[in-house]
Amino acid sequence: MAAGAAVRKAAPVLEAPPQHKQISHTKLSADDEWNLQQERMYKMHRGHESMHVEMILIFLCTLVIAQIVLVQWKRRHGRSYNLVTLLQMWVVPLYFTIKLYWWRFLSMWGMFSVITSYILFKATRKPLSGRTPRLVYKWFLLIYKLSYALGVVGYLAIMFTMCGFNLLFRIKARDSMDFGIVSLFYGLYYGVMGRDFAEICSDYMASTIGFYSISGMPTRSLSDNVCAVCGQIIVQLDEEGLTENTYQLSCNHVWERTHFLYGQILDWLRYLVAWQPVVIGIVQGINYSLGLE
C-alpha cells in the first residue's frame, strides 16, 4: 500500500507542462519574426554602449580617411582610378546577386555584359571599322535613355508611395516602394556602367583614328563642327535638338552634353557600390582585431 501511495503521489510530477507556455515560431508572421530578432539583438548588446561608441568613431574616421585617399587618387591618377572603380562596379554586384539569389538582376546584368563586351571589342579593333563609332554611339545613347527613364520612374514611384497615391490603385505600400527602389537602382547602376564604358570606348576610338595621342600631339586635326567620335554633327549650336542639344567645349569642338545633376548622382552611386563595401570591410577588420562586437 505504501509503495502504491508513493506511485500515486509521484504521478502528478510526470504530467506534461501546459501547452500555452510553448511558443510556435512557425505561426509568427514576418513582422513578428523580425521584431523577435531585434529584441534578441537588443538583449545581446545591452550594456555595450561604450563599445558601440568606439565602433562608430572607427567607422567615421575610416570613412573620412578613405574619402581623402580616393579623392587624391582620382586627382593624381584618374585613369587607374576609373578602371579599378569600373571593375569593382562590375564584379561586386555579381557577388551579392549570386549570394542572395537575385536572378532578375543577374539576367539583366548578363545581357548588358554580353552586349557591352561586344561593343568594347569592336571599339578596340585596329584598323577601326567605319561603322563602329556610330554603333558605339547608338548603344550607349540607348543605355543612357533607358537608365534615365528607369531612374525617373523609380523616383516618382517612391514619391507617390510616400504621398499615399498607391492606395488609389489598391497597391500595397511595400510593393510600390519595392518597385520604386528597384527601378531607381537599376537606372542609376546601368547609367554609371554605360557612362564609364562609353568613355573607355571613346578614348580607344579617338586614339585609333588619330585625334588623340599619349604624347599630347595628335596625328590628325579636326574641324570645329565635327564630332571626334561619330564624325557627324546633325544639330548645330544654335538649333534645338530632337533628343539632345549640342554644346561647345573649351577647345572649340562640339559635344552632346547630358545633365550635370544626373552625372553627379551617378558619381555618388559609383562610390556607394564600388567603394562602400571596401570601407565596411576595413572597418569590420579593425573591429575584429580590437575585439569589438
Image (cartoon, helix red, strand yellow):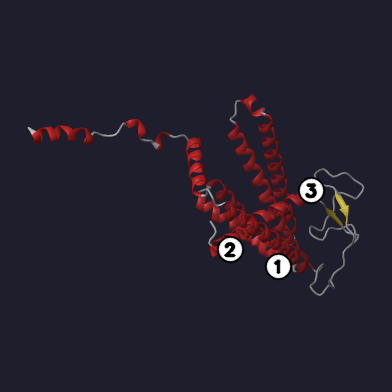
Q: Amino acid at mark 3?
A: Leu
Residue 265 image offset from top left, x and y in percent:
74, 49
Disc 2 or 1, which lies upstream in sequence? 1
| Mark 2 neighbour density, 10 Å: few (under 14) some (14–19) many (20 or more) | some
Residue at image location 31% in from the left, 31% down from the top: 18
Residue at image location 54% in from the left, 50% down from the top: 47
Residue 251 visible: yes
Residue farthest to the front? 2
| Mark 1 neighbour density, 10 Å: few (under 14) some (14–19) many (20 or more) | few
Q: Nearer the viewer, residue 146 or 54?
A: 54
- Secondary structure type for disc 1: helix
Residue 39 image offset from top left, x and y in percent:
50, 42
Disc 3 or 2, which lies upstream in sequence? 3
Q: Are marks 3 and 2 in contact (CB under 8 Å)?
A: no
> Quick one: quadrant of the N terminus?
top left
Residue labelled with disc 3: 261
Q: Amino acid at mark 1?
A: Ser
Q: Nearer the viewer, residue 222 or 93?
A: 93
| Mark 3 neighbour density, 10 Å: few (under 14) some (14–19) many (20 or more) | few
Horizontal relation, residue 192 to residue 210: left or right: left
Q: Is residue 71 above or below residue 109?
A: below
Residue labelled with disc 2: 286
- Secondary structure type for disc 3: helix
On the image, which quarter does residue 184 sit in?
Answer: top right
Residue 31 image offset from top left, x and y in percent:
51, 36
In the picture, the disc for residue 80 is 1
Residue at image location 81% in from the left, 47% down from the top: 244
Residue 13 image offset from top left, x and y in percent:
22, 35
Q: Nearer the viewer, residue 174 or 14?
A: 14
